[in-house]
Image (cartoon, rainbow, N blue to C red):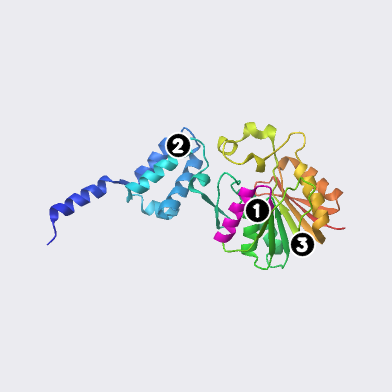
Amino acid sequence: MINRQLLSTSFYFYWLFCIIMKQTIQHIKKTLDPFYPATEIEGFIAIVFQYYLGYNATQMILNSDKTIEFEVENRIESVIERLKTGEPIQYILGETTFYDLRFEVNPSVLIPRFETEELVDGILKKHGNNKLKFLDIGTGSGAIAIAIKKNNPLAEVYACDISIEALKTAQKNADLNQVEVHFFHHDVLSDKPLPISGFDLIVSNPPYVCEKEKAAMNRNVLEHEPHLALFVPNNDPLRFYRAITLMATQHLSKNGELWFEINEAYGPEVADISTTHGFDAIIIKDINGKDRIVRGIFLH
């Protein structure tokens, strides 16, 4: 026979330790309002509920009157407190999505951006079914290399970085996405030659933010993402493009391609570097109409 008093008590404690979902959403908005614009807060809410409850936007609306268990509410509250300090939500949760793939991220690697998805998309539209030997320089989380390999299994993919910790993260991400990428340590500003040659395509999203641009950047980037992967000196903003372009002339096959993500302020200058070194170079604009990619075909 059911003990109705015990059932009633259990039901009471269940509701005591649960909170209505729409109340949590309002709490997040109110708490983060002094720190972030409304559109960014909406993005945080979508990410948090997808991560902890598996809800997409439609499911959030349909389930807005349902309860959230106390344990989940506590985890969400912890995320809110860390967001108040400016810590990126991707680092808080330890993951992000790039080109519809899941990637682990941490402060040793940059959080992959949408602009870089456009770079990957351009390469795949041109070479998505081609058997090619591919190198990603400054791979970070491995986002570019892994997305290329996942979407073109015929590609033989290599990737390098100066950071050992970044390479460890990139290897985890390759395992996570079940692709084979050959990672190796390399400093492109050194005189040390690459251990592999004969590439059909080399791509790089190198550091390209000038030190003088820091004042206009968000604190969540400045205080948490690795400066080694972001910044270049004001007096030498194109140092990586020169070094990588010279390296590409030594390691690309004839008619091989060199793809760069660039600082929108330096499109013509990066294209000129490529042209000077024997490339037929073009500038490609991103979805916002800004110079974002330089693609060069090696003619020599």
Q: Which residue is mark 1?
A: 118
- Picture quadrant of residue 123: bottom right
Instruction: Pick the residue in front: 159 or 204.
Output: 159
Q: How far across and down, in percent of the image, does residue 40 sit?
A: 51, 41
Q: Which numbered dot is residue 32?
A: 2
Taken as a whole, is the magenta stretch helix, strand or loop? Answer: helix
Q: Earlier in the sequence, mark 2 or mark 1?
A: 2
16 lies above or below 175: above
Q: What percent of the width, then of the height, locates residue 296? A: 79, 54
Q: Which residues are magenta?
A: 160-176
202 relative position to 143: left or right? right
| The N terminus lies in quadrant | bottom left
For image coordinates 35% across by 43% down, the residue present is 23
Q: Amino acid type of disc 1?
A: Glu
Q: Categorize mark 3 by other alpha carbons within 10 Å: few (<14), some (14-19), many (20+).
A: many
From this viewpoint, is residue 99 visible? Answer: no
Q: CA distance from mark 3 to mark 1?
A: 20 Å
Q: Three-letter amino acid code at disc 3? A: Asp
Q: Callout 1: few (<14), some (14-19), or many (20+) C-alpha neighbours within 10 Å?
A: some
Q: Quadrant of the C terminus?
A: bottom right
Q: Is residue 201 left or right of residue 59?
A: right
* Residue wearing tag 3: 200
Residue at point 42%, 50% (across, down)? 49
Query: Which image quadrant for residue 213?
Result: top right
